[in-house]
Image (cartoon, rainbow, N blue to C red):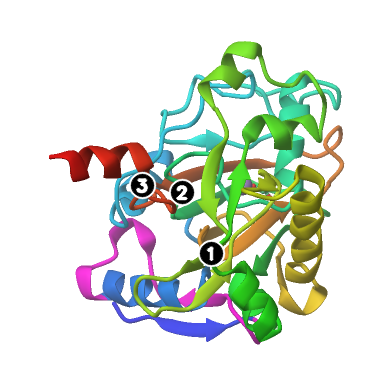
Amino acid sequence: MGITVRPLHPHFAAEIVGGRLRDIDEPTFGAVREAFEEYSVLVFHDQHLTDDEQIAFTRRFGPLEETVRSIAQNTRVALQIADLSNVDPEGNTMAADDRRMLYHKGNQLWHSDSSFKRVPAMASLLSAREVPPEGGETEYASLRAAWDALPVTLQQRLEDLVAVHSFAYSRSLIAPDLLLPEQEAQLPPVKQRLVRANPVNGRKAVYLGSHASQILGMPVEEGRALLRDLLEHATRPEFVFVHRWRVGDCVMWDNRAVLHRGREWDTKRDRRVMHRTTVAGEGPTVPDPDVADAAAAR
Ligand code: OGA
Ligand code: MN
């Protein structure tokens, strides 16, 4: 098939030209996979994938995550599809104060998908089915570029830190009662390393985002202030790539190495229909002490 990789930003992100994701052959898939590890964000135009095609392509990267059952879940799509639309299953645009829209508002905070899960997502693939004429862009920030630009003394201080990530925390930033108590109980806070290295090329990234609520072993406010400073640093304009959507686009990103956020649009006037598939991570970023203890005891 043959593809061309066209860089889109000085630090990361590339367009893949010439690949048809629905029937990509094995050597071409290998080249896409390589580009993914290298560029963190891959843009594919003119794909027009169905849900089944999107699921099949995403599976080639590894097992998929299933969506967390929430008030916003569209029950008419497969469990492997996260529906990020402002259109309800009956086809009507939702009111701005609809709880489902409030829930989606969380996507407009800088985040890494599923960092609130013990095994966080490796990659996400978002495809544009309907796009508004203005607004509704998705922005990406390179956590590798952010890491590289930190002073060495600060890098050394951060290297072994562990952050606590919590879905209830990030949703509380939107509205205090967004989660049902049983949902909150299903998603207890988890630990994530603050600094992660890519297993293929060793590139380090500072791993944080809206779900990161505190730093283990630090007073809550002090940890939160450090996370705030790092987030501000990581999302400086020079580390950010903006994707303006066209219908049929697919964008795939590496949740280990970038943050992303959606931008506002006129949700009352314009439809935006986006479907996401998510590749599960390979394991927890912090070894699970219970598992390690059990192994040591054998
Ligand atoms: C996502 C997400 C933002 C957007 O798909 O995980 O956060 O622009 N999307 O829709
Ligand atoms: Mn997201």
Q: Position of residue 224 (x, y in %)?
A: 77, 50
Picture residue at 68% right of the left edge, 67% below the top:
141
Q: Amino acid at mark 2?
A: Ala
Q: How many numbered discs, if any? A: 3
Dot 1 or dot 2: first in sequence order is 2
Dot 3 or dot 2: first in sequence order is 3
Which stretch did the figure color magenta?
Answer: 9-27
Judge left or right: residue 111 versus residue 266.
Answer: left
Q: Amino acid at mark 1?
A: Asp
**3 or 2: mark nearer the eye:** 2
**Crowdedness of circle 2 by 10 Å Cα count: few (<14), some, many (20+)?**
many
**1 or 3: mark nearer the eye:** 1
Dot 1 or dot 3: first in sequence order is 3
- To which residue does mark 3 refer? 53
- To which residue does mark 2 refer? 121
Up-down relation of residue 256 to residue 274 (above or below): below
Q: SS for tag 2? A: loop
Q: Nearer the viewer, residue 223 or 206?
A: 223
Location of residue 30 by image quarter: bottom left
- To which residue does mark 1 refer? 160
The image's mark for residue 227 is none
Q: Position of residue 85 (x, y in %)?
A: 66, 35
Q: Amino acid at mark 3?
A: Glu
Picture residue at 56% right of the left edge, 23% below the top:
74
Q: Nearer the viewer, residue 200 or 68?
A: 200
Distance in Å between CA atoms under marks 1 and 3: 40 Å
